[in-house]
Image (cartoon, rainbow, N blue to C red):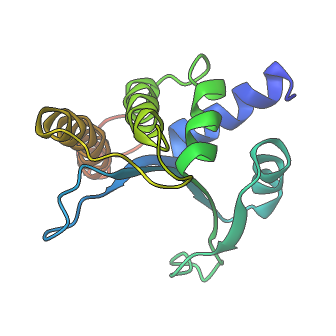
Amino acid sequence: MAKNTELAYIAGIIDGEGSIGAHGETLGKRNGSYQVNVQVGMTQIGSLDLFVKVFGGRIGLGCKPTSGGKPVYKWRLSARKAANCLEQLTPYLILKREQARDAIALARMNRQRLGKGTSPGYALPVPEDEKIMRREIANRIYQRNFSSNSRCRKWASYGNHGEKR
């Protein structure tokens, strides 16, 4: 079990450098299925080693290096592991707490439909009203990611003390 200080440290990095997402339901495949994920990209691989130690997952190279040429390392968890990670981190998250709660709710909906009276790995069909609810939750997660990115672009036009450049 991770120490509270480790969980708080990891939550702080996810708040600042990470993202929480829900992917699925492509055009043509509207079955209500979404996969929750959490990821962090950083130039310092040492911090990400702690993420692997505490939650598992993998570290890989990101697609693009920084503008200064440094490699960007990415840590990622998906599905049940991501939901379990977020359940432990939610008390420590500040900026992404609501996204985490939505992602956990979406993952629980997926778990409730898996394997009930069926062979392992098979999910029961999702009723239309639940598909709509899942879509709304996934859209909220997406919108929160988008709105936080918009704020970053806005602040990029200001100097250190809030003066417009």
Q: Residue furthest top?
A: 91
Q: Position of residue 116 (x, y in %)?
A: 46, 37
Q: Quadrant of residue 105?
A: top left
Q: In the drawing, does residue 151 fall left or right of residue 132?
A: right
What quarter of the picture does the N terminus occupy? top right
Q: How many marks?
A: 0
Q: Residue at x 59, y 16 (%)?
A: 91
Residue 7 at x, y = what percent?
A: 74, 28
Residue drawn at point x = 51 percent, y = 81 percent: 64
Return the residue nearer the eye: 77 or 110: 110
In which image quadrant can residue 163 be found? top left
Q: In the displayed structure, does residue 59 sit left or right of residue 17?
A: right
- At 38% from the left and 35% from the top, the residue drawn is 106
The image position of residue 4, as x and y in percent, is 80, 20
Whether 146 is drawn above or below 89: the answer is below
Q: Is residue 72 left or right of residue 134?
A: right
Question: What percent of the width, then of the height, locates residue 161?
Answer: 39, 34
Q: Nearer the viewer, residue 21 or 5?
A: 21
